[in-house]
Amino acid sequence: MWRRGAHSDAAHHLPAAGAGGSTSAAAAAGAVRRRRRPGLSCRPSHLFFALLVALFTASLLVVWQLLPIGDGNAAADGEGAPPPPDGGGAMRFSASRMVLRAFDTESRLEAARSARRWWPGLEPVRLALVVGTMNIDAESLMLTTLAKSLGGLGYEVEVLAFTDGKAHNIWKTICHVNVVSFEKLKYVDWSKYNAVLVSSLEGKRVVSILMQEPFRLPPVVWLIHDDALGQHLRNYPEPHLSVPNHIEDWRAHFNACTDVVFPDSHLPLLYSPLDTGNFLVIPGSPVDIWAAKRYGLSHSQGTIRNQHGIKEEDIVVLVVGSYLFFDELPWDYVTVLRTSAPHVMDMARTKKLGVQFIFFCGNGSDTYNSAFQELASHMGFPDDSVKHFPMTHDIGNLLMFVDIVLYGSLRQEPGFPPLLLRSMSSEIPIIAPNLTVITKYVTDGIHAFLFNSGDPSTAASAFMRILGEKGLLDTAYSVALEGKLLSKNMLAYDCIVAHVKLLESVLHYPSDARLPLSFSQVKERTWLWDPFESKAALGNSSSEDERHIHTRIAGILLGESAQSNWTIDSDSNDTSSYDYPTQSDWDDLSEVEIFEDIEMREMEEIDERVEKPLLTWDEVYRNARKSERMKPEGNERDEGELERTGQPVCIYEIYRGEGAWPFLHHGSLYRGITLVSPGTV
């Protein structure tokens, strides 16, 4: 091993000589410097062994991360839990696979503001908000609050609704409202908007227009609130073989959007056949709170308990978990319940209480039910104390007769669990682990009863804080009430801010635009409950909304989605029958272009190798003049020249399309008419 100090000493003690001696000394010093390896303090063999050890350690870490994490005590027991059933398409949550990404934190608004110098903005930033209906419902509640926040920041919002409703007056106090029919969509000048927000499945017609020129510039954000289309897609196990046009058409429309936004992580799993990489989850929608309010007004707790055979004095515990493991056995519950269930049953026997556990998980197939019963037997429950309901069952029906909700999943989720929020809004005491996403909003002993996620046996102490001699303690009822009050507006601010940040990240702010305020200036902390919350409005909206939802979803799925185009009957200028190319069409076109390019190059190479007779200057001149005359550009006059000479430009279209739209027929830039139906412009 070379040491710098040793060489320095050796060089220092070399004898001084004449010119020859100095030359030999310099040569020796140069040889020493060449033998040095700067930055290398050990032998190469040592580095090789160190690298080998590092690779081995990294491989062990990777294998350890891939191993399933379970209960160590359960693994040591002789009778372990039954293995998962064979088959069954379990839908696991994977942030990379489902592309449930977080949008760019870089704000284009701040970039536009920093690029400004002294000139003032003239035009406001205009947003179009397309809604299916203006009924009194949770969707209108969220969108009106969002529109009010955007207006307060300086955006100009215009609502385009397909159907009028009872929320029309509420909308008018917030922004400009325009009720348009499907037949009149072609008269809307979409180019005046800086962005378009679509908030209904009927908005597919609008997306179809925005997929065509000249309206492809504004970014489109599609807000998906319900699972109707996703449930429809689940009926086709092999969509590429069953209804290829149906799936391909919806996928093309989803792909045309800048972002497709869902209110929870469960909906993207249902819409996964349409995933094109632009799915985004923004939690916090008030749909769960609204559903709990509406269900409580139209159903009776005593009636539902009698329907399920629940005695009045029985304590019913509903065990829920994550939506992200839709078809799997509740393996997460095993860790919590195997340590707490025996204590709960002993506590119930001591207090002479009847306790029943209801599991809300998985599907309703016979295979799943048999596997679940075997799993329940390993948890230590008596046979008559456990019931199972699949996740397709109405959760509102279960929350009407249960007394306690236990959240048994110990896995972190992207947002606050929607089942937990729905339980809190139903004024039911909840027991949940102290996960980060839960403790961010909920306080132990005030809004819920929390237990240590690292020690699931502490869930039994949470039950001790709830159960009394004759039922639930007064503390449980007070905590349930506080949880209900908290859940009403718990996620409102985060939801609004996330939508505003999304707009700031996708909007292109023109140089002459009057820039709005940043998302940090959002003032709304609650939903606009006051104009929506009257009991009469909620009662009237119940049956009306259900009928409307079923009607419009049936019309979309059965009337339009089976074909890859849409048709609108109108007057002289009609827009119809758009057949959009599929991915296979683009692949075929690319192959044809590549083949033609190769063939053209081969012909050029052959022409270069063929001997050609020399031409005279006159022949070369005549050929050049002939090629000039064949070029169309030489015989055409540009639009500016035609406008100066007073000759209008008119482009005749032999098809029915956007070129015949009336609002484009101004000035000499573009004047289109259709030859299919009579009329001129």
Image: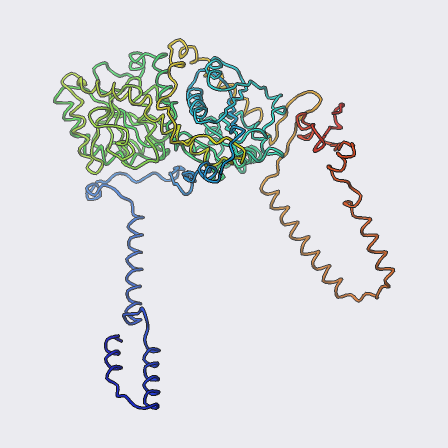
Q: Is residue 638 left or right of residue 515?
A: right
Q: Nearer the viewer, residue 10 or 547?
A: 10
Looking at the picture, does residue 297 appear above or below residue 61?
above
Looking at the picture, does residue 49 appear above or below residue 562?
below
Q: Nearer the viewer, residue 635 or 323?
A: 635
Q: Nearer the viewer, residue 264 or 121?
A: 121
Looking at the picture, does residue 622 appear above or below residue 316?
below
| Residue displayed at 66% across by 49% down | 592
| Residue displayed at 38% across by 11% down | 534
| Residue displayed at 76% across by 28% down | 675
Residue 30 appears in the figure: yes
Q: For the view shown, which residue lies furthest in the front direction?
A: 118
The type of colouring in the image is rainbow
Residue 273 appears in the figure: no
Which quadrant is the N terminus positioned in? bottom left
Looking at the rendered structure, the number of numbered marks drawn on it comes to 0
Quadrant assignment, res 555: top right
